[in-house]
Amino acid sequence: KQINMETKTKQVEKYSPMPLIKQLDERIKNGTIVVPENYNYVAAINSAMYLLSEATDKNGRPALEVCTSKSINYALTRMVFYGLNPLYNQGYFIVYGDELRFMPSYFGDRVMGERTGITNIVARVVFENDDFECEFKDGYPVIKHVYGGGDKITYAYCLFTLPNGRRAGDVMTFAQILKSWAHSKDPNRKSQNDSPEEMAKRTVTRRALKPYINSFVGDDVVTNEN
């Protein structure tokens, strides 16, 4: 156990976030970077380092040993731009070769959506025996949904209230959701089989909120995860 602890310490020490924290602190103070109000980016980076000390690539090699310092800096900076903390399940890190990437989770998407002023975010799935009708008025879905049961998912939708009080959202067929999953690099793909209902709600919520998050955070920060 003593040897393992020493090895783990060396892996964490290989990359230090202190230069990045100092750089971010300077840029935040001079206004070249803006982070959400009440967001503790130092705590978020420390949380990320704690999680990364346990993270591995697909071959079981420690992420902090495999990934380049440049990619770790980029992933942590991206997390800070989003204003998210992975310790609260608001995002996760993935190792691609020698690169580290940060991706917002479903909870992170909701947090970012709420920061834009969006409220009352609700996601539902539709089953084969449900009474479901959807029409679009001025580009926004108007839905009638009465639960009828069944095992087969046919649709999923997400509705929310915009800052101007108008209801908005999106609807996806299950075929569209499956196509999205097939192209996803999300490490939680096992969850799509174990919890298709929850994952379908996550997928449609992400697509519904993305345009508003993009305009709020900035298109140069938000990229297509698929």
Image (cartoon, grey):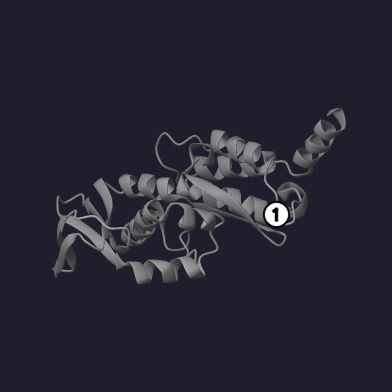
Task: Return the x and y of residue 44 as percentages of the image width and height.
Answer: 54, 37
For the point 74% across and 51% down, which residue is it? Answer: 60
Image-quadrant location for residue 137: bottom left
Q: Which residue is mark 1?
A: 57
Image-quadrant location for residue 156: bottom left
Categorize mark 1 by other alpha carbons within 10 Å: few (<14), some (14-19), many (20+): some
Is residue 220 in view from this perspective? Answer: yes
Q: Residue furthest top?
A: 2
For the point 75% across and 48% down, which residue is it? Answer: 62
Left or right: residue 57 versus residue 203 is: right
For the point 69% across and 55% down, which residue is it? Answer: 70
Task: Return the x and y of residue 172 as percentages of the image width and height.
Answer: 30, 66
Q: Residue furthest front?
A: 150
Task: Return the x and y of residue 226 as percentages of the image width and height.
Answer: 49, 67
Query: Disc 1 marks which amino acid?
Result: Asp
Image-quadrant location for residue 1: top right
For the point 48% across and 37% down, which residue is it? Answer: 88
Left or right: residue 156 versus residue 30 is: left
Task: Return the x and y of residue 198 as percentages of the image width and height.
Answer: 38, 51
Of residues 188 and 73, the one nearer the viewer is 188
Helix, strand or loop under label 1: loop
Left or right: residue 144 versus residue 117 is: left
Q: Is residue 154 above or below residue 15?
A: below
